[in-house]
Image (cartoon, rainbow, N blue to C red):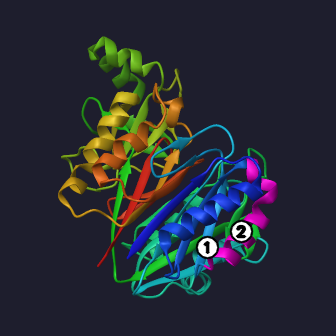
Amino acid sequence: MKFVSAVTTEVEFEDALKSLIQQTASKAGDASLDLMVVFASAHFTHSIREIVQDLLAALKPGLLIGCTAEAVVSRDREIEKGPAITLVAAQMPEVGLHHFLLQPDSLDWPKLLLDEDEFHRRVGAPEDTRLFMLLGDPFSAPMDDLLQAFNQYFPGIPVVGGIASAALRPGGNTLFVNDTVTSQGVVGVAFSGALDIDVVVSQGCRPIWRPYKVVEARRNEIYNLEGRAPLAWLQDLIPTLSEEDKSLLQTGLFVGRSVKPGQELLGRGDFVIRGVMSIDQQSGAIAIGDSVMDGDMIQFHLRDAMTALEDLEMQLIPQMFRDAACGGLLFTCNGRGTHLYERPNGDINIIQPSIKNVPLAGFFCAGEIGPIGKMNFLHGHTATLVLFRPA
């Protein structure tokens, strides 16, 4: 198994293509490429069809898949401003790659999500699938519901990927798989066969205080935590914070919902993190960006640049004791980068020393996909890294 990566910041798409093709061909040699994953900045939206066609013609990958994005990540750089295209290409013997498209104009979303047979037919993944990668359009793909369907119909199989972020209006993002270029729905690939996969999901938050059991909740609103309104707890607890944590609280309060029902000893990695959207001063209820049920365990969290770095470093520690991966993909939030850190290349400068500088490509997402525990979620402010090794 061999991965290579390439990146260009050329402004004209003809020059960008020439650079990418030369880099990839020189590193890959004469062997055929099984997979190519490409992420292009919004600068190239109007020329993406020609870019896809020329990459297919020149490099002849067995499968080409990708999307446009606000910003992209190369092997050693996060390119947040200006034109850029990044790619990772792979020779993956004994690995199956099955692609699929979920297009709103050719399917009935409710039927797809509620009918297991229809879902399996549309996705078409083999029984030995080890990993799914999804790239979605934020305006036409019900990604939360789609991930629930993957959790139900393909239990235990990790799903990674992200939401295209090149545009803030419907029709402005571009997804592509082989010679199909679209602005709607989802494109995906199922990986199967002789493949070893590690998925690292860093949500960049740290818990404060202790976990609380939800006594009363409806949809995304929490009314009662262990006999008291959430606001009542917060009014008692906030004065106990350090001055530093009180300062962080001004930038946002987060709630972690446990993904391990019934477990009371909880720590980092046991929660899916969601923002507190509002607090009702009269009732004391809070609303968060997720559905909550009676009996769920939650814990309040804080986020800042230092916490994000520490969390990412901690999640990467196991990689230091393994043989180097062959290649990787990174899906990071468009709220990270220089929006979170005081310097450029914040995530990639932590990641690459831990994974021995393997070929890698990624993009800044409008929502990141990754597993917590055995369930897959759509995240925010998160970095999802997937690493590939031969089985």
Amino acid type for the residue under numbered disc 1: Leu
At 29% across and 30% down in the image, what residue appears?
A: 208
- Give the quarter of the image for residue 386: bottom left
- Residue 178: % across, % down: 67, 76
Q: Which residue is mark 2?
A: 52
At 73% across and 55% down in the image, what residue appears?
A: 15
Position of 257 with respect to 111 (left or right) is left
- Give the quarter of the image for residue 168: top right
Q: Which residue is mark 1?
A: 64
Query: Is the C terminus in the top left, top right, bottom left or bottom right quadrant?
Result: bottom left
Amino acid type for the residue under numbered disc 2: Val
Q: Name the chief secondary structure element in magenta.
A: helix
Judge whether residue 23 is colored magenta: no
Name the one closer to the observer, 126 or 121. 126
- Which type of secondary structure does the marked residue at label 1 adopt? strand
Position of 122 with respect to 304 (left or right) is right
- How dense is the environment of label 1, judged by Cα within 10 Å: few (below 14), some, or many (20 and up)? many
Query: Is the N terminus in the top left, top right, bottom left or bottom right quadrant?
Result: bottom left
- Give the quarter of the image for residue 98: bottom right
Q: Which mark is residue 2?
A: none
Q: Does the CB distance between marks 2 and 1 fall below 8 Å?
A: yes
Q: Is residue 76 above or below residue 310?
A: below
- Which type of secondary structure does the marked residue at label 2 adopt? helix
CA distance separating discs 2 and 1: 8 Å
Which stretch did the figure color magenta?
43-60
At 59% across and 39% down in the image, what residue appears?
A: 80
- How dense is the environment of label 2, judged by Cα within 10 Å: few (below 14), some, or many (20 and up)? many
- Residue 217: % across, % down: 45, 44
Q: In terms of sequence position, does the residue under pointer 2 or pointer 1 come before the other?
A: 2
- Residue 294: % across, % down: 39, 49
Name the one closer to the observer, 360 or 138. 360
